[in-house]
Amino acid sequence: MTQMHQQEKKNYQDEKEKRRQERLAKQLRENLKRRKEQSRKRAQKES
């Protein structure tokens, strides 16, 4: 393995990790939004 090769591999893995993190963050935000919507609907039903 040449030095450049290792660097490219590292960059690729960093990139992959970053995308994974972003996807997780997006899922979290959407879950939060959904949960808020549900609790609001529940509150409307109860009142």
Image (spheres, grey):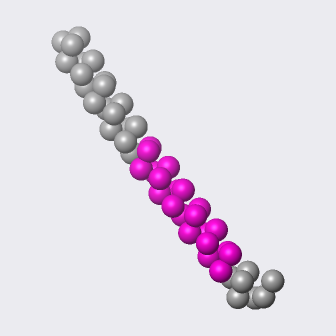
Q: Is 13 left, or right, of 26 in this rendering?
A: right
Task: Place residue 11 in its image quadrant.
Answer: bottom right
Task: Place residue 20 in its image quadrant.
Answer: bottom right
* Identity of the residue drawn at 68% across and 82% down: 7
Pick out the residue farthest to the top: 46
Q: Is 19 left, or right, of 5 in this rendering?
A: left
Q: Is 46 left, or right, of 18 in this rendering?
A: left
* Viewport quadrant of the C terminus: top left
Instruction: Count how many numbered circles sit on residues in the image.
Output: 0
Task: Place residue 38 in its image quadrant.
Answer: top left
Q: Is 10 left, or right, of 37 in this rendering?
A: right
The residue stretch that appears in magenta: 8-28
In the rendered view, tell whether residue 27 sits above or below residue 8.
above
Q: What kind of secondary structure does the magenta stretch mostly adopt?
A: helix
In the rendered view, tell whether residue 6 sits above or below residue 26.
below
Q: Is residue 22 magenta?
A: yes
Q: Is residue 23 magenta?
A: yes
* Identity of the residue drawn at 38% across and 38% down: 32
In the rendered view, tell whether residue 22 sits above or below residue 5.
above
Pick out the residue farthest to the right: 1
List x then y, in percent, for residue 35. 36, 31
* Identity of the residue drawn at 42% across and 50% down: 26
* Viewport quadrant of the N terminus: bottom right
* Identity of the residue drawn at 61% across and 72% down: 12
In the rendered view, tell whether residue 31 sits above or below residue 40.
below
Front one among 40 and 20: 20
